[in-house]
Image: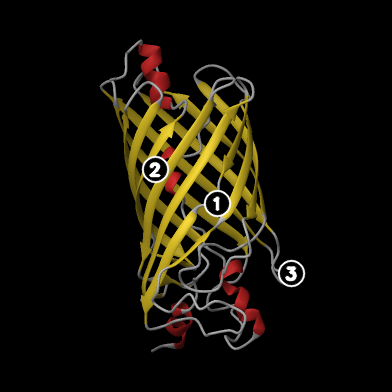
């Protein structure tokens, strides 16, 4: 096996998992004053190949993550909302022939067994800055690990790092041209804590476009793009895997990717939606060919609900 591929096989353990609420996306629209918005979801994420910084791929085995997540938003005013994402329960395993080297003091996650743990809290404040059909909503968020979980290994639940985030979401109902459609675009800048003095900030762009079919169905196109500023390029910047610094390689890798997907939502009532979604990684560096599917149940103010209200339509009972 070429040396490059051998490095890739061990490269990506502590993945930043896409939460089960992905189909909900990051909304520019806020819940009205005094209204709570609750989302419950489950997703199954899986990968078989790694891609290094030079585009080389390798197949170390199967990695599976089952994620259960819940988050709650509350409209403090009609223009200000707070949001809390509870730590996702991650149930994961790795089945393959290239486990990470066993290290004293660290749980062996690459043993072929299922492992379960809670991941990170995320708190967020959103402010609606505009009125009318185009909504611009800046936000600030803080991610904090729920406890000292294991971050070293192929099926790790996360990176166990505190991270500050700022960004903005812009959304628009496409009336009068397409009165049943909307688009949303989000930019996020994340600044995780440095590891061994290594900076690995990241920019993320998310896209969400939906079209309401009849009074209840919405079809959606989803896109996710990430660029990491700094961090290690695999295998160019990697330390020797026998060194102590190798322990943090999953936390600081320079992950760049583009993911595309879609979703279908159905309005069970005027304020309750059920969502089914899926996505796939179409381009990546220092990442894996991650794919995912999931379901979520959401009680919130959504773009499709706004369209229905504007048209004066009743949702099915």
Closer to the chain start, of discs 2 and 3, is 3
**Dot 3 lies on which element?**
loop
In the orientation shown, which residue stands out farthest toward the right? 197
In the orientation shown, which residue stands out farthest toward the left? 214
Q: Which residue is depicted at the point 53% across and 63% down?
A: 255
Q: Residues within 10 Å of mark 3 (few under 14, many from 20)?
A: few
Q: Residues within 10 Å of mark 1 (few under 14, many from 20)?
A: many
Spot occupied by residue 215 in the image (x, y as percentages of width and height):
28, 20
Can I make out residue 176 in this image? no
Kindly report which numbered mark, 1 or 3, lies closer to the viewer in this rendering.
1
Determine the CA span between mark 2 and mark 3: 35 Å
Can I make out residue 298 in this image? yes
Spot occupied by residue 208 in the image (x, y as percentages of width and height):
42, 38
Closer to the chain start, of discs 1 and 2, is 1
Q: Which residue corresponds to mark 2? A: 222
Spot occupied by residue 68 in the image (x, y as percentages of width and height):
44, 51
Determine the CA span between mark 1 and mark 3: 27 Å
- Quarter occupied by residue 126: top right
Viewer-proximal residue among 262 and 276:
276
**Dot 2 lies on which element?**
strand
Number of numbered discs visible in the structure rendering: 3
Q: Can you tell which mark lies on residue 197?
A: 3
Viewer-proximal residue among 135 and 48:
48
Taking the image as shown, residue 173 lies to the left or right of residue 189, namely left
Q: Which residue is depicted at the point 49% across and 29% down?
A: 171
Taking the image as shown, residue 143 lies to the left or right of residue 186, namely right
Taking the image as shown, residue 117 lies to the left or right of residue 66, namely right
Q: Which residue corresponds to mark 1? A: 87
Viewer-proximal residue among 2 and 268:
268
């Amino acid at each position: 096996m070429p040396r490059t591929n051998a490095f890739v096989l061990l490269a990506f353990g502590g993945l930043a998992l896409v939460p089960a609420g992905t189909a909900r996306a990051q909304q520019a629209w806020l819940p009205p004053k005094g209204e709570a918005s609750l989302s419950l979801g489950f997703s199954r994420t899986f990968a078989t190949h790694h891609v290094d910084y030079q585009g080389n791929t390798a197949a170390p085995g199967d990695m599976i993550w089952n994620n259960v997540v819940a988050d709650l938003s509350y409209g403090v005013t009609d223009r200000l909302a707070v949001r809390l994402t509870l730590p996702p329960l991650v149930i994961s395993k790795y089945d393959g022939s290239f486990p990470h080297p066993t290290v004293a003091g660290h749980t062996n996650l690459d043993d072929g067994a299922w492992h379960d743990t809670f991941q990170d809290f995320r708190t967020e404040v959103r402010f609606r800055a505009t009125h009318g059909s185009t909504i611009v909503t800046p936000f600030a968020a803080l991610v904090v690990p729920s406890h000292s979980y294991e971050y070293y290994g192929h099926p790790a639940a996360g990176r166990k790092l505190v991270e500050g985030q700022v960004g903005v979401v812009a959304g628009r109902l496409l009336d009068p041209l397409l009165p049943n459609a909307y688009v949303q675009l989000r930019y996020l800048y994340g600044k995780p804590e440095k590891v061994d003095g290594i900076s690995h900030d990241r920019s993320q762009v998310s896209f969400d476009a939906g079209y309401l079919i009849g009074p209840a169905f919405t079809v959606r196109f989803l896109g996710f793009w990430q660029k990491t500023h700094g961090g290690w390029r695999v295998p160019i910047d990697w330390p020797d895997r026998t060194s102590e610094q190798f322990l943090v390689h999953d936390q600081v890798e320079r992950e760049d990717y583009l993911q595309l997907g879609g979703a279908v939502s159905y309005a069970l009532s005027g304020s309750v939606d059920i969502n089914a979604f899926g996505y796939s990684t179409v381009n990546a560096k220092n990442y894996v060919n991650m794919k995912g599917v999931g379901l979520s149940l959401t009680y919130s103010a959504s773009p499709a609900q706004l369209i229905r209200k504007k048209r004066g339509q009743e949702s099915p009972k």
